[in-house]
Image (cartoon, grey):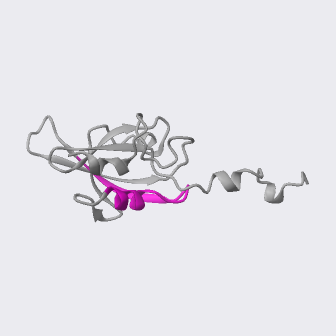
Amino acid sequence: SNGVPNGQPPTRAVSSQRPCGVGMAFKPGEDGGLFVKTMIAGGSADVTGKVRVGDELVAVEGKMIRGVMPRELARLMIGPPGSTVAMVFGRDQIDAPGTRLHIQVEMVRMDTGPGGGAGLASSTGTSIASVDTVS
């Protein structure tokens, strides 16, 4: 035995329990929707390959998010590392005007390190909690 219980590195249990998200930031649209602004490279949203910048977030865990306060949205999206969150995105079809693709994705929450721990921080450091100040 190397003296470490369960063979786990001693620091891992602490750092990996930090609540985290799926590695994406959102921006409010003119019509009140929330749209994917950025995705963290290697984060869960990026790795699925299903979501694109510009997609609209429609629902999280079955809850329609239009009109939901940012704090409530963060509560829905953030959770323990390794847990999953079901999300639905909408994407307007450029080649077929007036039609909309709905993309259902189950993402695994990942701790992407400093700055990305919440999965909601954008490249400028503003979190989703700031979108309610955008008029």
Q: How many marks?
A: 0
| Image quadrant where residue 58 sits | bottom left
| Image quadrant where residue 98 sits | top left
Magenta run includes residue 39: no
- Residue 84's x, y, as percent? 47, 58
Which residue corresponds to the image point at 42% horizontal and 47% vertical from the top-left? 120
| Image quadrant where residue 65 sits | bottom left
Residue ranking furthest to the left: 98
Q: Quadrant of the N terminus?
A: bottom right
* Rendered position, 41 above or below 61: above
Which residue corresponds to the image point at 47% horizontal and 34% vertical from the top-left? 41
Residue ranking furthest to the bottom: 62
The front one of 63 and 68 is 68
* Rendered position, 92 above or below 8: above
Q: Is residue 13 left or right of residue 116?
A: right
The front one of 119 and 90 is 119
Which residue corresponds to the image point at 20% horizontal and 44% vertical from the top-left? 29
- Residue 78's x, y, as percent? 46, 57
Magenta run includes residue 79: yes
Q: Is residue 9 left or right of residue 115?
A: right
Q: Which residues are magenta?
A: 70-90
- Residue 35's x, y, as percent? 27, 44
Which residue corresponds to the image point at 61% horizontal and 57% vertical from the top-left? 17
- Residue 8's x, y, as percent? 76, 53
